[in-house]
Image (cartoon, rainbow, N blue to C red):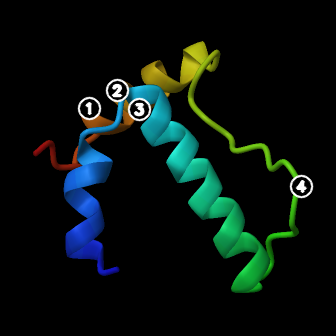
Amino acid sequence: MTLADLLPDARRLSAAEKLKLIRILAEDLEMTEQIAPLEPFKTYDLPTPYDCYGAGAVLMEAFKQPGTSQQ
């Protein structure tokens, strides 16, 4: 079965089923492809800007400084 055969069926899945499919495929890759430096079944924390209320103010000040471009 090719990806072209799978995509139409995958697109008809509900959002919850799509998430389950993503998780299953990611776990399969993790186990078979030996993706380094990730370890199987380990949870990784990713830093995000959430709850960092001063970060927006710092970024705005950086944009206001001469020599920075706003696009």
Query: What's the distance in space between the residues labelled 1 and 3, CA to CA?
Result: 9 Å
Which quadrant is home to the N terminus?
bottom left
Whether residues under marks 1 and 2 lie with C-beta atoms below 8 angstroms apart, the answer is yes
Instruction: State the image coordinates of residue 47 (x, y, percent, origin top left).
Output: 68, 40
Query: What's the distance in space between the residues labelled 2 and 4, CA to CA?
Result: 36 Å
Mark 1 or mark 2: which is in front?
A: 2
Tell me the kind of residue under disc 4: Lys
Whether residues under marks 1 and 3 lie with C-beta atoms below 8 angstroms apart, the answer is no
Residue at the farthest front position: 1
Q: Which mark is residue 59?
A: 3
Instruction: State the image coordinates of residue 22 (x, y, percent, origin top left).
Output: 52, 51
Which quadrant is home to the C terminus?
top left
Query: What's the distance in space between the residues labelled 4 and 3, CA to CA?
Result: 33 Å
Count residues near mark 3 (Cα–Cα under 10 Å), then give few for <14, some for 14-19, many for 20+.
few
Whether residues under marks 2 and 3 lie with C-beta atoms below 8 angstroms apart, the answer is yes
Residue identified by numbered label 1: 64
Mark 4 or mark 3: which is in front?
A: 4
Query: What's the distance in space between the residues labelled 2 and 3, CA to CA?
Result: 4 Å
Residue identified by numbered label 2: 60
